[in-house]
Amino acid sequence: PKPKASARKKKGDSASSTTPPTPTPNTTAESAPRLSADEGSDKDSDETVKSEAGKDGDEDDDEDDDDDDEEEETAKDD
């Protein structure tokens, strides 16, 4: 049990060290809501674009499919 106590003490020290980084998760939480709001706006735009892409993309579903192809050709020409 004596060695265990030592290990326990060591663990406690580690926990203390982990306490300072506690604010790190706090920052993540702040970023999380921000990302959510951003994602929501982005999702709306993405959904509209996706819907349009499907109509325009036809089979590739890549709104930039046509543009991509042309760009690739231009790059080759270059």
Image: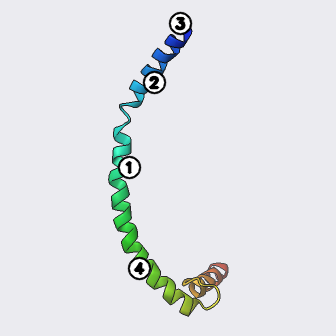
Q: Measuring from the top left, give residue 33's x and y in whole percent.
A: 34, 59
Amino acid type of the residue tagged 3 in the rendering: Lys
The residue identified by callout 3 is 2
Amino acid type of the residue tagged 2 in the rendering: Ser
Amino acid type of the residue tagged 4 in the rendering: Ser
Which callout, 4 or 2, points to the residue nearer the camera?
2
Q: Quadrant of residue 23?
A: top left
Near mark 2 (Cα within 10 A), the count class, few <14, some 14-19 or many ≥20, is: few
The residue identified by callout 1 is 28
- Left or right placement of residue 29 versus residue 55 in this view: left
Quadrant for the C terminus, please: bottom right
Q: Nearer the N terminus, badge 4 or badge 3?
A: 3
Q: Which residue is the extreme one toward the right?
A: 76
Residue drawn where x is 32% and y is 52% of the image: 30
For label 3, the SS is: helix
Tell me if label 4 and label 3 are in contact, CB under 8 Å.
no
Q: Nearer the viewer, residue 43 or 6?
A: 6
The residue identified by callout 4 is 45
Near mark 3 (Cα within 10 A), the count class, few <14, some 14-19 or many ≥20, is: few
Q: Nearer the N terminus, badge 4 or badge 2?
A: 2
Q: Measuring from the top left, give residue 41's x and y in whole percent.
A: 36, 73
Tell me if label 2 and label 3 are in contact, CB under 8 Å.
no
* Marks 4 and 3, how far apart at CA: 62 Å
Residue 14: which disc? 2
Q: Nearer the viewer, residue 72 or 39?
A: 39
